[in-house]
């Protein structure tokens, strides 16, 4: 039966080819795992510094010198990891994926400049159009002014939603407010809506005379669902930090 | 095989059979990744690497490959090299891999790679196939670089991220009549027009020959 032997030959060929390909790829993946993790870590630190509005050439050194991880409890008190009896590495590892804002001890990074504190960076996570999105938001020590914002991990549509990771888009977050001020300019810290809204169109055109302009960000045309995801991510992640931010705002 | 013949294998896809300008293949990525020169260069090198080595290996096993799974076998080989490039970029050029995002993975579907495997590599010995694949990639690469250079210079005023149109030439509030960047250049349609013009020029020149 020549048909059967032909089929056998084909099967053997495919099996061998696939095994070789799989072997090559798995070797490669395990060999490159360490440098890939390192590159990812470096990028994360860099993005955090951008959110903190610090520009530097030596990312790792600046990060070590100026950024301190802390946690915030339900009452809005700032604790070190020792005080909260947590281990930083395992805490990160465990909660990386789901985010930190829903935990009893919420992650926060202090920005130091010598002995003074310049502000805080809050990790933000949420869902874009296709997948989870992760970013940072830097807040000044007044608890409401934004220092900077970045999105370091996303899988949005290239050229549209993916533009949330572009510096050109992120630059407009600087000096926005996360608490919505009333029309007279006062902020009611306990009740004011908390977050940043990505609107449709340009802020200058949509809110020419409204205080809403202070908490709104220009939308990316063709990416309104990603914009909604970003808006929701800020609202969901900032709300749990409110007790802490209120304290900052009042002091 | 004589040197002369090998040379034709290498030179043919560079100009006479250029995959973009003559065969009009690989257009999709040519539009997407030519906004600036560094991006275009990375893509050009990646594609050259993938076409060269996948052609080599497709040709190496061409006599053993059963006809019925020919294309699947080619795809498997191509994807090994594409994933290699992707993983390598992620490890050592993280920022570039973020900019290129899906487009590196999409090299698998770039018609040039499959086209070379199907029309050349499966019919000739490994060395000519390698040369043919390499030069098909390079032929694609230099077109990408030309488009990338034009888009970067006229769209951003820079070349390889270095400013070449001086800041003092630019229009300001006090001198609104000075130079401005062409806003169309960073957008995909600009690549489309530039590519069309390059195809036209290439046709014009080869018709005269």
Image (spheres, coloured by chain):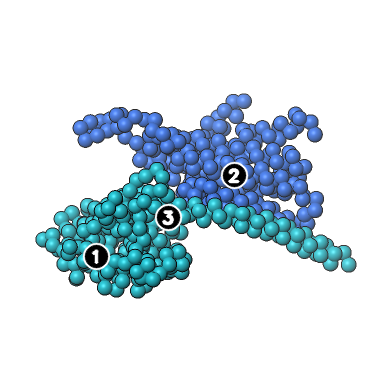
Chain colours: A cyan, B blue
Q: Secondary structure at mark 1?
A: helix
The residue indicated by pointer 3 is A44
Numbered label attached to residue B1: none
Cα gap from disc 2 to disc 3, whole angstroms: 29 Å
Q: Is residue A146 visible in the rendered structure shown here?
A: no
Foreground mark, 2 or 1, reads: 1
Cα gap from disc 1 to disc 3, whole angstroms: 24 Å
Residue A122 screen position, x and y as percent: 33, 61
Q: Secondary structure at mark 3?
A: helix
Q: Are the residues under marks 2 and 3 on the same chain?
A: no
Q: On the picture, is A8 further left or further right than B188?
A: right
The residue sitting at 53% across, 54% down in the picture is A36
The residue sitting at 21% across, 35% down in the picture is B173
Q: Is residue B54 visible in the rendered structure shown here?
A: yes
Q: On the picture, is A90 further left or further right than B68?
A: left
Q: Chain of mark 1?
A: A
The residue sitting at 26% across, 73% down in the picture is A75
**Badge 3 density bin: few <14, some 14–19, many ≥20, Cα 10 Å:** some
The residue indicated by pointer 2 is B47
Nearer the observer, B98 or A189: A189
Count of all numbered marks drawn on residues in the image: 3
Q: On the picture, is A176 further left or further right than A160?
A: left
């Amino acid at each position: 039966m020549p048909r059967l032997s032909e089929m056998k030959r084909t099967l053997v060929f495919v099996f061998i080819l696939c095994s070789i390909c799989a072997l090559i790829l798995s070797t490669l993946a395990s060999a490159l795992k360490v440098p890939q993790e390192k590159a990812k870590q470096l990028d994360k630190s860099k993005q955090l510094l951008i959110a903190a509005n610090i520009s530097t050439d030596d990312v790792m050194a600046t990060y070590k010198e100026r950024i301190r991880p802390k946690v915030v409890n339900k009452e809005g008190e700032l604790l070190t990891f020792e005080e909260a009896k947590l281990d930083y590495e395992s805490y990160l590892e465990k909660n990386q994926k789901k985010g930190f804002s829903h935990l009893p001890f919420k992650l926060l990074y202090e920005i130091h400049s010598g002995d003074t504190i310049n502000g805080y960076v809050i990790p933000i996570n949420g869902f874009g159009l296709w997948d989870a999105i992760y970013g940072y938001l830097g807040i000044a020590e007044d608890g409401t002014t934004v220092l900077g914002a970045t999105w370091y991990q996303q899988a949005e549509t290239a050229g549209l939603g993916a533009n949330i990771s572009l510096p050109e888009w992120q630059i407009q977050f600087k000096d926005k407010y996360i608490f919505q001020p009333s029309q007279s300019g006062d902020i009611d810290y306990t009740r004011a809506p908390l977050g940043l809204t990505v609107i449709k169109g340009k802020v200058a055109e949509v809110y020419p005379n409204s205080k809403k302009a202070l908490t709104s960000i220009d939308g990316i045309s063709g990416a309104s669902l990603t914009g909604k995801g970003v808006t929701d991510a800020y609202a969901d992640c900032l709300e749990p930090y409110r007790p802490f931010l209120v304290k900052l705002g009042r002091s | 095989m004589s040197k002369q013949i090998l040379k034709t294998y290498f030179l043919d896809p560079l100009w006479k059979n250029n995959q973009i300008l003559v065969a009009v293949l690989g257009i999709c990525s040519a539009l997407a990744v030519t906004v600036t020169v560094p991006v275009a260069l990375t893509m050009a090198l990646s594609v050259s690497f993938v076409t060269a080595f996948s052609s080599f290996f497709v040709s190496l096993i061409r006599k053993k490959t059963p006809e019925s799974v020919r294309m699947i076998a080619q795809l498997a080989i191509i994807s090994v090299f594409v994933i290699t490039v992707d993983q390598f970029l992620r490890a050592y050029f993280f920022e570039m891999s973020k900019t290129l995002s899906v487009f590196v993975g999409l090299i698998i579907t770039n018609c040039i790679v499959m086209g070379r495997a199907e029309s050349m590599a499966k019919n000739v010995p490994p060395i000519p196939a390698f040369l043919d694949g390499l030069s098909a990639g390079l032929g694609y690469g230099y077109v990408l670089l030309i488009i990338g250079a034009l888009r970067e210079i006229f769209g951003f005023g820079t070349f390889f991220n270095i400013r070449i149109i001086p800041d003092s030439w630019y229009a300001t509030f006090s001198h609104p009549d000075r130079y401005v960047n062409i806003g169309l250049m960073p957008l995909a349609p600009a690549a489309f027009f530039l590519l069309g013009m390059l195809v036209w020029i290439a046709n014009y020149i080869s018709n005269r020959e």
